[in-house]
Amino acid sequence: MLVKLYGIDPEADHRYSPARCLGSQVTRISGAPDLAEVGTSHVERQNLTMRMGMRRFTRLTNAFSRKVENLAAAVSLHFMYYNFARPHMSVANPYSMTPAMAAGVSDHVWKIEEIVALLDR
């Protein structure tokens, strides 16, 4: 686990400037990971996808969730659509397969109506 320690830069514009990194602390959580293979690229890509796909995760926005339940529902719907209903070029032939199909979890590209039908249960 990498914990970054941030502080306030007294010379920076506080509204638009990022906090200053004062240092970091590396802690092994469990097991014996090969530190040469550790990386954050997959998590960072997922965070970027979420920020680009949902307005409530962009910076300086007024599109936020007032209840944690609404936030959880929005994130769930986003990832359901992203993994089951949106074909990806990076998975197989251009626009023919979703990540869920590539993982063997689904056998078809889901339609929006199918996802909405899950909400009625």
Image: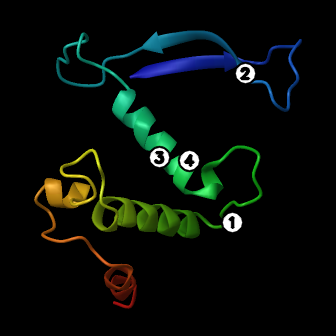
- Name the amino acid type tagged 2: Ala
Quadrant of the rendered image containing residue 20: top right
Quadrant of the image containing the C terminus: bottom left
Residue nearest the viewer, comparing 91 with 33: 91
Give yes or no for contact between labels 4 and 3 (Cβ–Cβ under 8 Å): yes
- Name the amino acid type tagged 3: Thr
**Label 2: how many Cα within 10 Å (few below 14, some 14–19, many 20+):** some
Q: Which residue is mark 3?
A: 49
Residue nearest the viewer, comparing 96 with 18: 96
Give yes or no for contact between labels 1 and 4 (Cβ–Cβ under 8 Å): no
In screen coordinates, is 30 left or right of 103? right
Q: CA distance from mark 1 to mark 4?
A: 18 Å
Q: Which residue is mark 4?
A: 51
Provide residue 109's location: percent of width, then percent of height.
24, 70
Provide residue 53's location: percent of width, then percent of height.
53, 55
Quadrant of the image containing the N terminus: top left
**Counting residues from the N terminus, which is met first, the one under dot 1 or under dot 4?**
4
Q: Is residue 114 above or below residue 45?
A: below
Q: CA distance from mark 2 to mark 1?
A: 25 Å
At x 56%, y 63%, the residue is 71
Give yes or no for contact between labels 4 and 2 (Cβ–Cβ under 8 Å): no
**Counting residues from the N terminus, which is met first, the one under dot 2 or under dot 1?**
2
Q: Which residue is mark 1?
A: 66
- Name the amino acid type tagged 1: Arg
